[in-house]
Image (cartoon, helix red, strand yellow):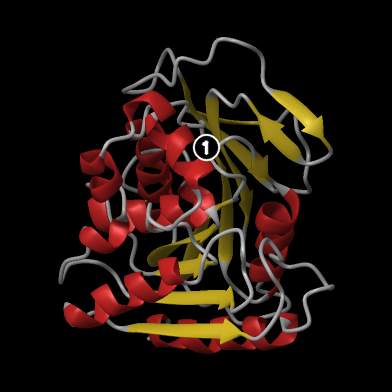
């Protein structure tokens, strides 16, 4: 694990190379080079990295909070821009240290992205060396779409749990759900009723699951809103604090794009919700 100048530059203060398939606990089996099939869409990722954006204390009082960001992309690629580094810059401007996780895609190995997210949390908490200049008092996880599944997966089944989760139109449930994400996660040939149930994360919520904020659109046809409502209901059944905002329109995948009509509303809601963790 080392801090280095990244081959990919997104204006980050530092890049931490977490591990690759040879040094990680498990491999995703991808041996071909990483690709960028279209601008800011990364595919074939087999090396986990963190792009770090420290809280800008010249513009905002420090909050003591850090957030690991998991971009979406159906577990087949990473939308590194509007669901990653652009969100990180905005968080940093608001006094929150942000770390965009370029996670290894599962390629049918569901344990792989989970162990990347767990290690990212350890780094921002200072539990392992490598990110000493970026350690935060409380560390949450944020995810978009399939990255939202990874964030909720870490929150429910991880051995390292975040202090909170921020879930944007997350993939949660297999039926009905975004089948491409589940096919990529466990492998299409490995899909069974048992694996569907195991990785439908509403089934994995316990009283130890961290609080969650869910943000989604009512007209999302890519990831049905039922994913978020089932997760929210499971959290409430177990006495876990949660809040959910369902915007009337917007569809799927809006992230921090200006074209999303309710961008200002979700940003205000998120910052307000996080104030409880600054205490």
Q: Position of residue 102 (x, y in %)?
A: 58, 39
Q: Position of residue 14 (x, y in %)?
A: 65, 42
Q: Position of residue 74 (x, y in %)?
A: 57, 44
Q: Is residue 187 above or below residue 129?
A: above
Q: Is residue 144 above or below residue 239?
A: above
Q: Looking at the image, which residue is at 37% across and 32% down?
A: 186
Q: Which residue is mark 1?
A: 103
Q: Is residue 121 above or below residue 266?
A: above
Q: Looking at the image, which residue is at 38% across and 52% down?
A: 174
Q: Looking at the image, which residue is at 57% across and 74% down?
A: 216
**Quadrant that contains the C terminus:** bottom left
The image quadrant that residue 206 belongs to is bottom left
Residue 158 showing in the rendered view: no
Q: Position of residue 73 (x, y in %)?
A: 62, 45
Secondary structure, mark 1, is loop
Closest to the observer, 56 or 226:
226
Q: Looking at the image, which residue is at 73% across and 78% down?
A: 59
Residue 231 showing in the rendered view: yes
Total marks drawn? 1
Q: Residues within 10 Å of mark 1 (few under 14, many from 20)?
A: many
The image quadrant that residue 40 belongs to is top right
- Tell whether 76 sits left or right of 204: right
- Tell whether 57 sits left or right of 239: right
Q: Is residue 3 above or below residue 33?
A: below
């Amino acid at each position: 694990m080392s801090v280095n100048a990244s081959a990919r530059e997104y204006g980050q203060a530092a890049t931490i190379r977490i591990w690759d398939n040879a040094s990680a606990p498990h491999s995703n089996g991808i041996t071909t080079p990483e690709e960028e099939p279209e601008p800011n869409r990364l595919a074939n990722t087999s090396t986990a990295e963190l792009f770090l954006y420290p809280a800008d204390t010249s513009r905002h009082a420090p909050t003591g909070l850090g957030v690991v960001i998991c971009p979406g992309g159906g577990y087949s690629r990473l939308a590194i821009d509007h669901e990653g580094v652009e969100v990180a810059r905005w968080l940093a401007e608001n006094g929150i240290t942000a770390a965009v996780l370029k996670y290894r895609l599962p390629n049918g190995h569901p344990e792989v992205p989970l162990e990347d997210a767990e290690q990212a949390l350890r780094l921002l908490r200072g539990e392992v060396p490598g990110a000493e200049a970026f350690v935060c008092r409380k560390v949450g996880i944020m995810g978009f779409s399939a990255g939202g599944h990874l964030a909720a997966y870490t929150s429910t089944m991880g051995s390292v749990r975040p202090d909170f989760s921020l879930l944007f139109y997350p993939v949660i449930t297999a039926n009905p759900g975004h089948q491409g994400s589940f096919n990529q996660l466990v492998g299409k040939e490995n899909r069974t009723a048992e694996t569907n149930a195991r990785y439908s994360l509403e089934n994995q919520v316990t009283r130890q699951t961290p609080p969650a904020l869910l943000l989604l659109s009512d007209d999302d046809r890519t990831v049905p809103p039922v994913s978020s409502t089932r997760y929210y209901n499971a959290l409430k059944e177990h006495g876990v604090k949660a809040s959910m905002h369902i915007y009337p329109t917007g569809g799927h995948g809006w992230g921090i794009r200006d074209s999303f009509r309710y961008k200002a509303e979700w940003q205000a809601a998120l910052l307000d919700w996080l104030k409880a963790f600054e205490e």
